[in-house]
Image (tube, rainbow, N blue to C red):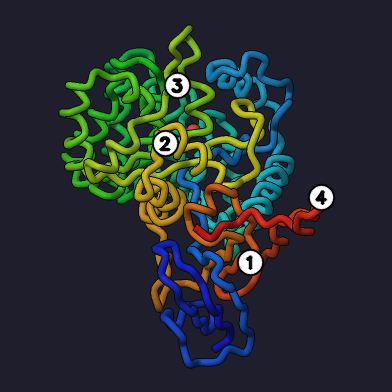
Amino acid sequence: MDLVIRNATLPDHTRADIAISGDKIAAIGTDLAMKGRQEIDANGDLVAPPFVDAHFHMDSTLSHGQPRVNQSGTLLEGIALWGELKPLLAQEALIERAMQYCDWAAARGLLAIRSHVDVCDDRLLAVEALLEVKRRVAPYLDLQLVAFPQDGLLRSPTAFDNLKRAIAMGVDVVGGIPHFERTMAEGAESVRLLCEFAADKGLRVDMHCDESDDPMSRHIETLAYHANRLGLHGRVAGSHLTSMHSMDNYYVSKLLPLIAESGVAAIANPLINITLQGRHDTYPKRRGMTRVPELMAAGVDVAFGHDCVMDPWYGMGSGDMLEVAHMGLHVAQMTSQEAMRACFDAVTETPARILGLEGYGLQAGCYADLVILDAGSAIEAIRLRAPRRYVLRRGRVISRSPAARAELNLPGRPEQVDFRLGQ
Ligand code: FE2
């Protein structure tokens, strides 16, 4: 074997050794007899498949403050600010920002990202730039691109043509933003047009859908309807779905089984939803994240996405999907043992399924893409936003980080603090 990782704790709490040959996992099980040319003793630390971000905007990331900061911190000022920045974008600068973010991602064990790319700039400069980034990072990070008509498919006169051009250039997924169209009817029409286009081309769909506190924003119903009608089960995702937070409970009791039946996945973005929604409320203020545990209970795949890092909408973040899971756990009150573990799945296995990643996972035959964390369990990893001791891509260590320990100088107390309890 090229590499054997000993004494790993897996996300399901079992112990195992992991043997790696070339770029694949050759065997995984207890007390493997095979020897590795290189061995790593995980010493009971968590070993997981890499983090996956199902919802991101790499064209705007790390642009915070350009050309000015978002004074109100609201979604609409963010969209307006992005509109100011778009004509000023330069390809090399955009590539450089995205590459820097991918460095952060790799160091955090985040090795697959689905990024929306705005196609409402007739130059398609961001599309060209991110296709170049996708090519450059391919050896260590799977970047999947979504053609995103930020200014509205029907509201922006050239958006649909631009979206088709972007797909022809190599963008992977069809995006949309029905709640931003001029009317509910045009929103529904945009969903129909985009789903039919995707079905015709054999592509996946991921729409910004109902990113609003308006309980009457019901485009998810239309998205589920067309996914079902066109046989797109398992290939469509609704991102955000924040209006579901404010919807009437009776209506949601009808909606949840419709979403499950259509095989549409949900992608919540807890860091962004908790900061951008509920902004027109006084008190009580709504949380504005979609109904994550209820969707999961209905059998819907639910992932947590990062959405933004240091851009017109959000001046925080560092590519850490454990921070995303941590916020999602709190906002959704997912504090049972099972629910906390589900929050870990929402930034690993579930988004991998939504993206359709091949060879992802912890079985023999999967790619040897692994993260060894400074934590004893998936729940502890979330609690500590644990350092990634080792990040492996295709069997090769691509990043290392020190464990989180503090030197202590207190009378009668240990000299070193370890925040782990192993649970
Ligand atoms: Fe987004």
| Residue 203, above or below 393 | above
Frontmost of labels 3 and 2 is: 2
Label 2 and label 4: CA atoms lie apart by 43 Å
Circle 1 sits on which residue? 390
Label whose residue precedes the other's in the sequence (3 or 2): 3
**Distance of mark 3 from mark 4, alpha carbons?**
67 Å
Q: Amino acid at mark 2?
A: Ala
| Kind of element beneath mark 2 | strand
Residues under labels 1 and 2: Cα distance?
28 Å
Q: Residue at x 50, y 92 (%)?
A: 34
Q: Earlier in the sequence, mark 4 or mark 1?
A: 1
In the image: residue 384, left or right of residue 338: right
Tell me the residue that label 2 is attached to: 268
The label shown at residue 410 is 4
Marks 1 and 3 sit apart, C-alpha to C-alpha, by: 48 Å
Measure the C-alpha gap from mark 4 to mark 1.
31 Å
- Say whether disc 3 or disc 4 marks the residue closer to the N-terminus: 3
Q: Is residue 46 above or below residue 265?
A: below
Q: Nearer the viewer, mark 4 or mark 1?
A: 4
Of mark 2 and mark 4, the one earlier in the sequence is 2
Q: Earlier in the sequence, mark 1 or mark 2?
A: 2
Disc on res. 157: 3
Q: Position of residue 379 (x, y in %)?
A: 48, 52
Task: Return the residue found at the far top.
Answer: 282
Q: Can you tell me whether the CB of the residue at mark 4 lies under 8 Å from the nearest atom of ligand 1? A: no
Quarter holding the N terminus is: bottom right
Q: Position of residue 346 (x, y in %)?
A: 41, 48
Nearest the eye: 343 or 355: 343
Most foreground residue, 120 or 311: 311
